[in-house]
Amino acid sequence: MGYELYRDDGQGGEVTTKIEEMASDNPSLTSYTIDLSADGVVGQIYRFKIVGTNYAGQIDSSALYVALASLPSKPTTIPTSDPTITN
């Protein structure tokens, strides 16, 4: 009994990559963070699904779509203004 989390490859393939490091037997788990920095590609759309299992059998959730994004880099210079070109 428990649940498993799966994702696709970000290329629109099947949602078959199991997230092995997730504790699948923790019934109080309400959120989970996945680090795709090793093999993820910024701009790709990833699909996830949960498979729940109990004594009656198992069921797959609908796929959830997530876009892998990144924050812009920190500015390297301080902002400046030029009063001759702004009013």
Image: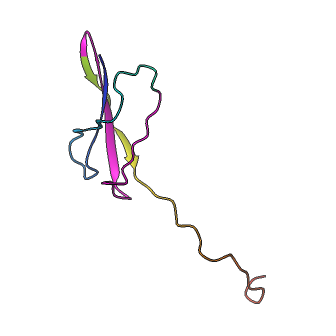
Q: Nearer the viewer, residue 62 or 54?
A: 54
User: Where's the C terminus, which quadrant?
Assistant: bottom right
Task: Write down the quadrant of residue 18 in the picture.
Answer: top left
Q: Is residue 63 above or below residue 76?
A: above
Q: Is residue 41 magenta?
A: yes
- Residue 60, given in percent of the width and then of the height, sits at 28, 26
Q: Is residue 29 left or right of residue 4?
A: right
- Residue 32, given in percent of the width and then of the height, sits at 43, 35
Task: Write down the quadrant of residue 54 in the picture.
Answer: top left
User: Where's the N terminus, which quadrant?
Assistant: top left
Q: Residue furthest top?
A: 55
Magenta stretch?
30-57
Q: Residue furthest bottom?
A: 84
Name the residue rendered at 38%, 59% in the picture.
42
Q: Nearer the viewer, residue 39 or 81?
A: 39
Q: Is residue 65 magenta?
A: no
Q: Nearer the viewer, residue 86 or 73?
A: 73
- Residue 2, given in percent of the width and then of the height, sits at 32, 20
Name the residue rendered at 34%, 26% in the picture.
24
Q: Is residue 9 above or below residue 71?
A: above
Name the residue rendered at 46%, 58% in the picture.
70
Name the residue rendered at 46%, 32% in the picture.
31
Q: Is residue 10 above or below residue 86?
A: above
Q: Is residue 13 left or right of residue 65?
A: left
